[in-house]
Amino acid sequence: MLVKDIMTENPVTAIELMSVAEALGLLYELDVRHLPVVRGRELVGIISDRDLRSFSEAAEDEAIEAVEGARSSTVGSFMNTSPVKVDPETPIREVIELLLLHRVGAIPVADLDTGDLLGIVSYVDLLRRFQETLEPTT
């Protein structure tokens, strides 16, 4: 089985100049944990809910400052600028190894020649596919 068989194609993305508040809103609205960051179609990074934890988990007495910080900070300041990436022909076994090795929850899928983002594959995609292989319980 290959990445192209289970990846989420054309995922919602962020751009470097997007505010952290906007990115947090997208993560919450879409119920996802990772947003690839693009410049045009080119993958330039990835941002996760963990990268933005300081904004979303502020203590009650720090909430106003966290909101102001999220509005004035950009994704480009917090994103991982050298994410692990794979191409659509990568075997699923290799993706699992990369997820475990790098301790990440998702890996962007890109055209490795052009850098264009094609999709994303996450541990949730892998679990869904695995669930399909299990026998139904009675």
Image: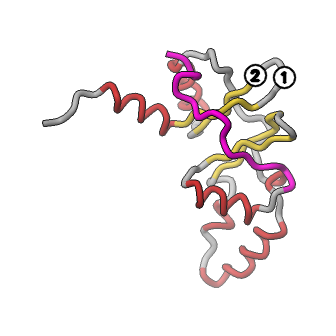
What residue is drawn where x is 57% and y is 22%?
3
Residue 2 x/y as whole percent = 54, 17
Q: Quadrant of the C terminus?
A: top left
What residue is drawn where x is 81% and y is 49%?
15
Judged from the image, the secondary structure of the residue bearing numbered disc 1 is loop
What residue is drawn where x is 58% and y is 35%?
8
What residue is drawn where x is 28% and y is 28%?
134
| Quarter-of-image position of residue 71 | bottom right
Q: Is residue 4 above or below residue 15?
A: above
Residue at label 2?
Answer: 111
Around disc 1, counting alpha carbons within 10 Å, would you say few (fewer than 14), some (14 to 19), or many (20 or more)?
Answer: few
Report the disc number at residue 114. Answer: 1
Q: Is residue 77 above or below residue 132?
A: below
The front one of 47 and 53 is 47
Magenta highlight range: 1-17
| Quarter-of-image position of residue 27 | bottom right
Judged from the image, the secondary structure of the residue bearing numbered disc 2 is loop
Mark 2 and mark 1 in contact (Cβ < 8 Å)? yes
Query: Is residue 53 inside the magenta stretch?
Result: no
The disc labelled 1 sits on which kind of residue? Thr
